[in-house]
Image (tube, rainbow, N blue to C red):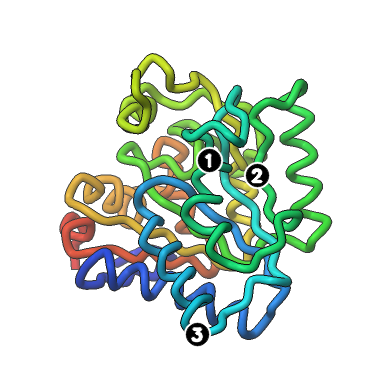
Amino acid sequence: MASGIDVRVLDDAATIAQEAAGLFAALLRDCPAAVLGLATGSTPELTYAEMGRLHRDEGLSFAQARAFNLDEYLGLDGDHDQSFRYFMQKHLFDHIDIRPWNTFIFDGTARDPQAECEAFEAKIRAVGGVDLWLLGLGGNGHIAFNEPGSASDSRSRVVTPHPETVAANSRHFADPSEVPAQGLSVGVGTIMDGRKIVLIATGAHKAEAVARAVQGPRTPACPASLLQDHAACTFMLDRAAARGLSA
């Protein structure tokens, strides 16, 4: 398998969640003030549930940790039930002891979105960079809102999600027309600066994107393939998501 990506094929989504959460737990036990990079979407929900369990049942503390999220919808307030801030509160932050002032998510209502993006990058630099990013994977190979065509050195910016991404996200909205047309997202370069990366993908519908990311050419046409150049990137896949990989 000619790639710099470490591929781990696991039995099911629950096992992936345990393993992924375990990476964050090990990091926090070694470095309580670690900087965490977090994703939204249905894929990481089980991982966040496991993090909450580790905090509740095993005493894993997030009290000194800092957390940065990959992206946010432009135009949505953090109290909107489809904002990524709301998602993170619901699925993780409200269930652990992380300090609210140490959770950093783009302000979707910022009057100057580009200035918000520049400030977000500055905050990451100020804390010494992200220790571990958690990523999902879009069906077209996108990571965060970095759609096909995103440069390897791209930074946080205003982005226009691909229609395929908008369609995939529309299931969460009462009316598909309510899906915001733009978002704020860290760049591929921002992700690549992280010391470690773990990407989780489940289901046969992700198999093609996984194969392109791991075994295809390194190209902005599949942003996840740019992760091949990272020194410490792990893909955790279930068998269905891995079925397109050659031995």
Where residue 163 sits: x, y (%)? Answer: 37, 22
- Residue 53, by quadrant, is bottom left
Q: State the SS at label 1.
A: helix
Query: Is residue 221 in view?
Result: yes
Which amino acid type is marked by label 3?
Glu
23 vs 59, nearest the viewer: 59
Give the total number of marks visible in the rendering.
3
223 vs 180, nearest the viewer: 180
Check disc 3 and report the residue beneath it: 58
Q: Is residue 156 left or right of residue 228?
A: right
- Residue 99, by quadrant, is bottom right
- Residue at the right extreme of this rendering: 126
Q: CA distance from mark 1 to mark 2?
A: 8 Å
Where residue 148 sits: x, y (%)? Answer: 43, 33
Name the residue: 54% across, 68% down.
231
The answer to which of marks 1 and 2 sits earlier in the sequence is 1
Above or below, 129 relative to 155: below
**Local crowd at mark 1 within 10 Å, few (<14), some, or many (≥20)?**
many
Which amino acid type is marked by label 2?
Ile
Q: State the SS at label 3.
A: helix
**Local crowd at mark 2 within 10 Å, few (<14), some, or many (≥20)?**
many
Above or below, 1 relative to 177: below
Above or below, 85 relative to 60: above
Query: Is residue 229 in view?
Result: no
Name the residue: 55% across, 50% down.
89
Numbered circle sitting on residue 105: 2
Check disc 1 and report the residue beneath it: 84
In the rendered image, the quadrant that contains the C terminus is bottom left
Q: CA distance from mark 3 to mark 1?
A: 27 Å
